[in-house]
């Protein structure tokens, strides 16, 4: 996966440069590096059940909003070997509810045939804390989804709960991907996280969909992930 490693390294380098700039400028930057036994997106493996490495950097622009980039390896039948996402938006608060209003531009490197994989989604994702738990919902919309498949929407409900004062937490989600034509499916996941200090975390998560008949990438799977955040 040379393209993926180069993209992940580029994202990490950008984060390191941003962090260096942040020492002279109060504008905060957050970046992350991690890996997993599989890259699962909305219940579907993006790496044909193989491992993932990823990196990201995000700038908090204060009242203007946020902007960032995220990169990972993928393994698509059309030759794509890497994904690079550009993100941006605002996160205003309405009473106890934080609303993430943003966009994601999904780009792919290495594709050598077939309809283009790249597409853009708009996002509306409110969340709020009730006691120790956090509850959220999300709506993503694309006018022309993956491989030029037409309009698409993804709806999700999610929740997370720390387990007392321990470093463990539970989280899960259920979502519905709706694509023009026969591409609709439901997905769900449930996982347990373990925080090793403030900057390193593990996640063990079960993923599944209701569309096992389409391809093996839609089948159930257990994924172990590791993520480091800094500074």
Image (cartoon, helix red, strand yellow):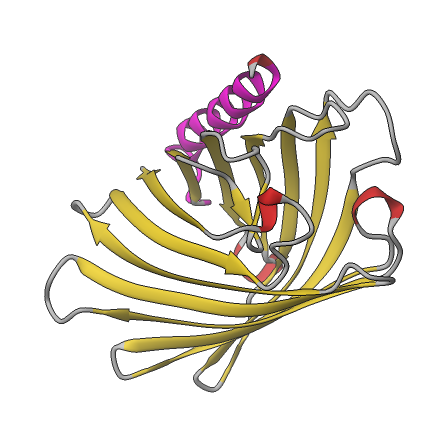
Residue 16 at x, y = what percent? 43, 26
Q: Which image quarter: residue 20?
A: top left
Residue 207 at x, y percent in the picture: 46, 55
> Is 163 placed above or below 23 here?
below
Residue drawn at point x = 74 percent, y = 64 percent: 184
Task: Using the image, determine if residue 89 lies above or below residue 34.
Answer: below
Residue at screen point 36% across, 53% down:
205
Is 20 magenta? The answer is: yes
Q: Residue furthest left?
A: 165
Instruction: Specify the quadrant that holds the C terminus.
Output: top left
Place of residue 199 in the rendered image (x, y in percent of width and height, measured from the top left): 25, 43
Is residue 66 positioned above or below 133 on the image?
above
Most extreme residue toward the front is: 213
Measured as percent of width and height from the top left, residue 173 is found at 47, 68
Task: Give the camera-side residue of 32 and 147.
Answer: 147
Q: Residue at x 64, y 51 (%)?
A: 88
- The part of the chain drawn in magenta is 3-27
Q: Is residue 194 left or right of residue 6?
A: left
Give the left or right position of residue 10, taking residue 148 as reference.
left
SS majority, magenta: helix
How many dots with numbers? 0
Of the 4 image quadrants, the one containing the N terminus is top right
Image position of 34 (left or right of 66):
left
Examine the image and state in which quarter residue 24 appears. Answer: top left
Name the one closer to the observer, 100 or 200.
200
**Position of residue 157 in the picture relative to residue 135 (left or right):** right
Which of these two is toward me, 34 or 230? 34
Q: Residue at x 27, y 84 (%)?
A: 131
Assess whether residue 193 is covered by the magenta stretch: no
């Amino acid at each position: 996966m040379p393209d993926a490693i180069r993209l992940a390294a580029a994202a990490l380098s950008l984060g390191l440069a941003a962090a260096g700039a942040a020492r002279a400028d109060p504008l905060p930057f957050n970046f992350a590096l991690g890996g997993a036994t599989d890259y699962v997106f909305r219940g579907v493996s993006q790496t044909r059940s193989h491992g993932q490495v990823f990196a990201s950097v995000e700038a908090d622009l204060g009242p203007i909003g946020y902007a960032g980039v995220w990169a990972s390896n993928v393994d698509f039948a059309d030759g794509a070997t890497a994904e690079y996402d550009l993100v941006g938006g605002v996160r205003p608060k309405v009473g106890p509810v934080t609303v993430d209003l943003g966009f994601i531009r999904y780009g792919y490197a290495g594709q050598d045939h077939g309809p283009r994989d790249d597409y853009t989604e708009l996002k509306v994702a409110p969340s709020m804390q009730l006691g120790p738990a956090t509850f959220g919902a999300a709506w993503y919309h694309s006018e022309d989804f993956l491989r030029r498949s037409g309009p698409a929407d993804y709806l999700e409900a999610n929740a997370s709960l720390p387990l007392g004062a321990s470093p463990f937490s539970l989280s899960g989600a259920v979502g519905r991907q709706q694509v023009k034509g026969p591409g609709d499916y439901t997905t769900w996941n449930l996982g347990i996280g373990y925080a090793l200090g403030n900057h390193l975390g593990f996640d063990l998560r079960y993923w599944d969909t209701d569309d096992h008949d389409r391809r093996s990438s839609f089948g159930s799977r257990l994924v172990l992930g590791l993520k480091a955040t800094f500074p």
